[in-house]
């Protein structure tokens, strides 16, 4: 009789272990399906939002901001672009096998960010994209439109712009990022982007400025804003180019995107641009530069994409970076900047672990701005 009872107890214990293992397996599978890369967040982790199943690895702070004044928390959003995980200009800058988009979005949420730029890896169907974003309490901050007014492709540009306006309507966003790509060399191999970038003649400038005013008016009519992105390897790259573009466009229709990394790369002081155009800056990419890599790229004529592979870009908060962000952020806060502050650092994930750098940037921003 005692033997029978013992066997029953053993069988019951075994059954309980099997049930426990089964439940644990279901939980692990569920976590993997949404792309969570860490199942042991710290006890102090804060929830991102009531609709999200993820938590932030950057808990709220009660410490005062370094900036004084700082930004209005209700009018500034913090985001990060996917380029630290996978590069949109060259999809081969990735892990092998490639990082799934679910992991990218989940790590953004884990890092405490609220939004992201749209990317080639993300779901194309709006309902699928919305579902994945809602699961992590994220939003789309912006799409990218490469205009081609300077090479006679005005209608193709209008058509693409209309697509992105429609996309942002569906995503409840209001910002369209544009850059003129006529003659651009930043995606070409073995081409020095600083030496070989296009230089527009007067007619090309006229076509570009007219086209941007047209698109800006269309954006405004749809409750949105057009922000122009000066970019390495393109015809609008340095301070002189920026001045000509700002002077030649309607300030109500064409705003400026401040990309600290591209400006520094081009030999432009991003703080000087911030001070001069603070009232027209309506979107910000916070991108850092590793000075030693930049110096070598300039010396050897290294291409833009090869420079990325070598680690030219990094995030705010990286001690290896050369860009001084505090005075730039202070100028923006003094100008009552409203909109997205987007961390961006095109990096090779084989050399720079994306989550590590996302957390680095988020913690830095929290110290600077207080949230």
Image: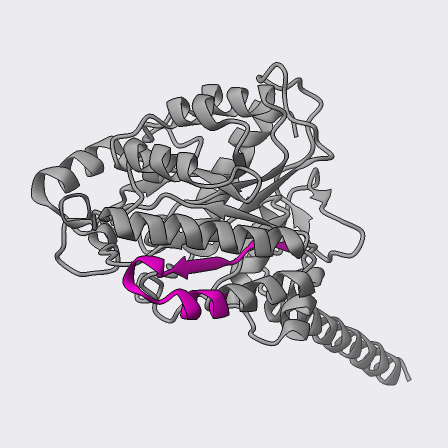
Residue sitting nearer the eye, 18 or 345:
345
The residue positioned 41% from the left and 45% from the top of the image is 229
Evaluate whether residue 221 shows in this view. Answer: yes
* Residue 344: quadrant of the picture: top left
Position of the C terminus by quadrant: top right
Q: Nearest the camera: 226 or 65?
A: 226
In this orientation, which residue lies closer to the viewer: 320 or 346? 346
- Residue 84 visible in image: no
Which residue lies most toward the left here? 300
The correct choice, above or below, for 280 with respect to 161 in the image is: above
Whole-percent x, y for residue 235 in the image: 27, 48
Please tell me which residue lies in front, 237 or 287: 237
Q: Is residue 94 left or right of residue 293?
A: right
State the image coordinates of residue 24 (x, y, percent, origin top left).
Answer: 70, 69
Residues drawn in magenta: 139-160
Q: Is residue 91 magenta?
A: no
Horizontally, residue 58 falls left or right of residue 7, namely left
Give the quarter of the figure containing the N terminus.
bottom right
- Where residue 318 sits: x, y (%)? 39, 32
What residue is drawn where x is 27% and y is 42%? 312
In the rendered structure, does residue 151 fall within the stretch colored magenta?
Answer: yes
Residue 116 placed where, x, y %?
56, 53
**Left or right of residue 163, residue 133 in this image:** right
Query: In the figure, is residue 76 to the left or right of 293?
Result: right
Label count reads: 0
């Amino acid at each position: 009789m005692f033997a029978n009872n013992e066997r029953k107890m053993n069988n019951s214990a075994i059954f309980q272990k099997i049930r426990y293992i089964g439940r644990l397996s279901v939980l692990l599978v569920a976590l993997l399906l949404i792309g969570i890369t860490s199942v042991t967040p710290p006890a102090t982790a804060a929830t991102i939002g009531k609709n999200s199943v993820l938590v932030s690895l950057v808990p709220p702070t009660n410490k005062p901001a370094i900036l004084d004044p700082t930004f209005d928390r209700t009018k500034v959003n913090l985001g990060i672009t996917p380029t630290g995980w996978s590069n949109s200009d060259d999809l081969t800058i990735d892990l092998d096998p490639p990082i799934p988009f679910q992991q990218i979005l989940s790590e953004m949420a884990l890092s405490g960010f609220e939004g992201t730029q749209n990317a080639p890896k993300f779901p194309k169907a709006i309902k699928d994209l919305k579902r994945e974003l809602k699961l992590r309490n994220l939003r789309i901050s912006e799409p990218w439109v490469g205009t081609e007014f300077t090479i006679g492709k005005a209608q193709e540009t209008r058509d693409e712009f209309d697509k992105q306006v429609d996309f942002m309507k569906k995503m409840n966003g209001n910002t369209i990022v544009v850059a003129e790509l006529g003659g651009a060399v930043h995606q070409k191999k073995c081409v020095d982007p600083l030496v070989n970038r296009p230089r527009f003649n007067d007619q090309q400038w006229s076509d570009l400025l007219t086209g941007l005013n047209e698109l800006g008016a269309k954006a405004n009519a749809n409750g949105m804003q057009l922000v122009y992105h000066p970019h390495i390897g393109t015809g609008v790259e340095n301070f002189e180019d920026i001045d000509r573009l700002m002077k030649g466009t309607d300030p109500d229709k064409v705003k400026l995107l401040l990309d600290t990394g591209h400006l520094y790369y081009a030999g432009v002081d991003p703080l000087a641009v911030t001070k001069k155009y603070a009232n027209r800056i309506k979107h910000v990419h916070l991108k850092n530069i590793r000075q030693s890599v930049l110096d070598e790229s300039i010396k050897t004529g290294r291409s833009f994409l090869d420079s990325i592979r070598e680690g030219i870009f990094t995030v705010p908060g990286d001690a290896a970076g050369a860009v001084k962000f505090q005075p730039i952020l202070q100028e923006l806060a003094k100008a009552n900047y409203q909109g997205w502050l987007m961390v961006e650092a095109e990096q090779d994930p084989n050399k720079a672990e994306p989550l590590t750098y996302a957390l680095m940037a988020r913690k830095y921003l929290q110290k600077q701005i207080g949230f």
